[in-house]
Amino acid sequence: MKTHKHHIIELLKSRGHHDHAAEAEASLPDELDTDEHEDNLKRWGVSTNDISPASSIGIRRMGL
Protein backbone atom coordinates (compact mmCIF):
# COMPACT_ATOMS: atom_id res chain seq x y z
CA MET A 1 0.00 0.00 0.00
CA LYS A 2 1.25 3.48 -0.76
CA THR A 3 0.93 6.24 1.80
CA HIS A 4 2.53 9.51 2.86
CA LYS A 5 5.20 9.49 5.53
CA HIS A 6 3.32 12.09 7.58
CA HIS A 7 0.64 9.45 8.27
CA ILE A 8 3.31 7.19 9.75
CA ILE A 9 4.84 10.05 11.72
CA GLU A 10 1.46 11.14 13.14
CA LEU A 11 0.64 7.55 14.11
CA LEU A 12 3.95 7.20 15.95
CA LYS A 13 3.49 10.54 17.72
CA SER A 14 -0.05 9.61 18.75
CA ARG A 15 1.43 6.54 20.46
CA GLY A 16 4.02 8.65 22.26
CA HIS A 17 6.92 7.33 20.14
CA HIS A 18 8.45 10.70 19.33
CA ASP A 19 11.94 9.28 18.84
CA HIS A 20 10.61 6.77 16.27
CA ALA A 21 8.66 9.60 14.61
CA ALA A 22 11.85 11.64 14.26
CA GLU A 23 13.64 8.62 12.80
CA ALA A 24 10.78 8.07 10.32
CA GLU A 25 10.88 11.75 9.35
CA ALA A 26 14.58 11.47 8.54
CA SER A 27 14.56 8.09 6.80
CA LEU A 28 11.30 7.72 4.87
CA PRO A 29 10.55 9.28 1.49
CA ASP A 30 7.51 11.61 1.30
CA GLU A 31 5.49 8.93 -0.50
CA LEU A 32 6.27 5.36 0.44
CA ASP A 33 5.23 1.84 -0.32
CA THR A 34 4.62 0.06 2.97
CA ASP A 35 5.85 -3.23 1.50
CA GLU A 36 9.22 -1.70 0.58
CA HIS A 37 9.64 -0.16 4.05
CA GLU A 38 8.16 -3.06 6.01
CA ASP A 39 11.34 -3.65 8.06
CA ASN A 40 11.40 -0.10 9.41
CA LEU A 41 7.67 -0.07 10.04
CA LYS A 42 7.88 -3.33 12.00
CA ARG A 43 10.82 -2.00 14.01
CA TRP A 44 8.70 1.02 14.94
CA GLY A 45 5.69 -1.17 15.79
CA VAL A 46 3.58 -0.15 12.79
CA SER A 47 1.69 -2.65 10.66
CA THR A 48 -0.31 -2.07 7.51
CA ASN A 49 -3.42 -2.70 9.62
CA ASP A 50 -2.53 0.43 11.62
CA ILE A 51 -2.58 2.58 8.51
CA SER A 52 -6.03 3.71 7.48
CA PRO A 53 -6.96 2.80 3.90
CA ALA A 54 -8.26 6.36 3.56
CA SER A 55 -4.72 7.61 4.15
CA SER A 56 -3.34 5.66 1.21
CA ILE A 57 -2.33 7.68 -1.81
CA GLY A 58 -4.53 5.89 -4.35
CA ILE A 59 -7.77 6.33 -2.41
CA ARG A 60 -7.01 9.95 -1.60
CA ARG A 61 -6.35 10.76 -5.26
CA MET A 62 -9.65 9.14 -6.23
CA GLY A 63 -11.44 11.51 -3.89
CA LEU A 64 -12.78 8.78 -1.62
Image: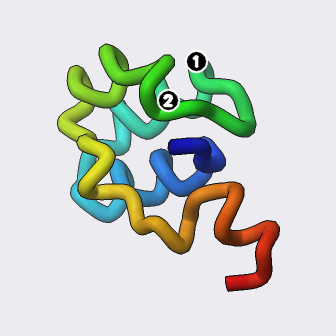
Few, some or many residues within 10 Å of mark 2 (<14, 14–19, 20+): some
Secondary structure under tag 2 reads: helix
Q: Which residue is mark 1?
A: 27
Q: Position of residue 16 (x, y in %)?
A: 25, 54
Could you tell me which residue is drawn at 35 percent across and 32 percent down?
Answer: 20
Report the side of 3 relative to 47 (left or right). right
In the rendered image, residue 5, in percent from the top left (x then y), is placed at 60, 42
Q: Measure the alpha-carbon separation of dots 2 and 1.
A: 5 Å
In this rendering, position of residue 6 left or right of residue 36? right
Side of 38 where 24 appears, left or right: right
Which quadrant would residue 60 be assigned to in this image? bottom right
> Count of labels shown?
2
Identify which residue, 26 or 50, lies in the foreground.
50
On the image, numbered disc 2 is attached to which residue?
24
The correct choice, above or below, for 64 with respect to 32 in the image is below
Judging depth in this view, the residue of 16 and 34 nearest the camera is 34
Q: What amino acid type should be assigned to the residue bearing mark 2?
A: Ala
| Three-letter residue code for mark 1 | Ser
Label 2–label 1 contact, CB within 8 A: yes
Name the residue located 23 percent from the left edge and 58 percent from the top edge.
15
Give the x, y percent position of residue 10: 47, 58
